Amino acid sequence: MTKIEMTTAILAAKKAKKTTWAAISKAPRISEVYCTSTCLGENALELAEARKVAAFLRLPPKVVEALTEPACKGETSPAVPKEPLQYRLQEIDGAHRNPPACRAALAMCWLNRDTSKSS
């Protein structure tokens, strides 16, 4: 099972169960953001955590295996930009496809900006 197939299965199970990322993340007792990124194919879980997520969503063992495989971040991106801001925006778009994570990442970039160079 590919990461894309895994994500499709997880999103279908999440919708069918009418649950939230927060509820799913409580099964393996990991952060909601990390659980979400893993379920969207951008990270990997330990075997025990993957089993708990799959059990919570009533998914087959193939999903457990896919959840434990390392991700190739940004594999759907066409090219890696050379300009830092473009790179960060593409990373946010590619790795954090849920709105709360995008807002958090943008806020972090804004708070960590270098204001000493402003005129």
Image (tube, rainbow, N blue to C red):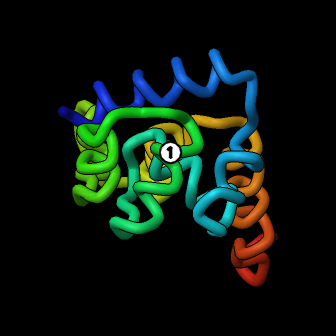
Q: At 65% from the left edge and 36% from the top edge, which residue is drawn?
A: 98
Q: 85 and 31: which one is in front?
A: 31
Q: 37 and 118: which one is in front?
A: 37
How many numbered circles does the render carry?
A: 1
Q: Is residue 14 left or right of residue 1?
A: right
Q: Quadrant of the C terminus?
A: bottom right
Residue that label 1 marks: 55
Q: At 50% from the left edge and 54% from the top edge, which residue is drawn?
A: 88
SS assignment at label 1 = helix
Q: At 30% from the left edge and 54% from the top edge, which residue is drawn?
A: 82
Q: Is residue 2 above or below residue 119?
A: above
Q: 103 and 111: which one is in front?
A: 103
Q: Quadrant of the N terminus?
A: top left
Q: Position of residue 86 (x, y in %)?
A: 46, 46
Q: Is residue 77 visible?
A: no
* Mark 1, other Cα within 10 Å: few <14 / some 14–19 / many ≥20: some
Q: Position of residue 63 (x, y in %)?
A: 32, 39
Q: Is residue 58 above or below residue 37?
A: above
Q: In the displayed image of the protein, which residue is found farthest to the bottom? A: 116
- Quarter assignment of residue 47: bottom left
Q: At 52% from the left edge and 38% from the top edge, which residue is drawn?
A: 93
Q: Is residue 3 above or below residue 34?
A: above
Q: Is residue 114 visible?
A: yes
Q: Disc 1 marks which amino acid?
A: Ala
Q: Is residue 15 left or right of residue 42?
A: right
Q: Position of residue 85 (x, y in %)?
A: 52, 54
Q: Is residue 118 left or right of residue 93?
A: right
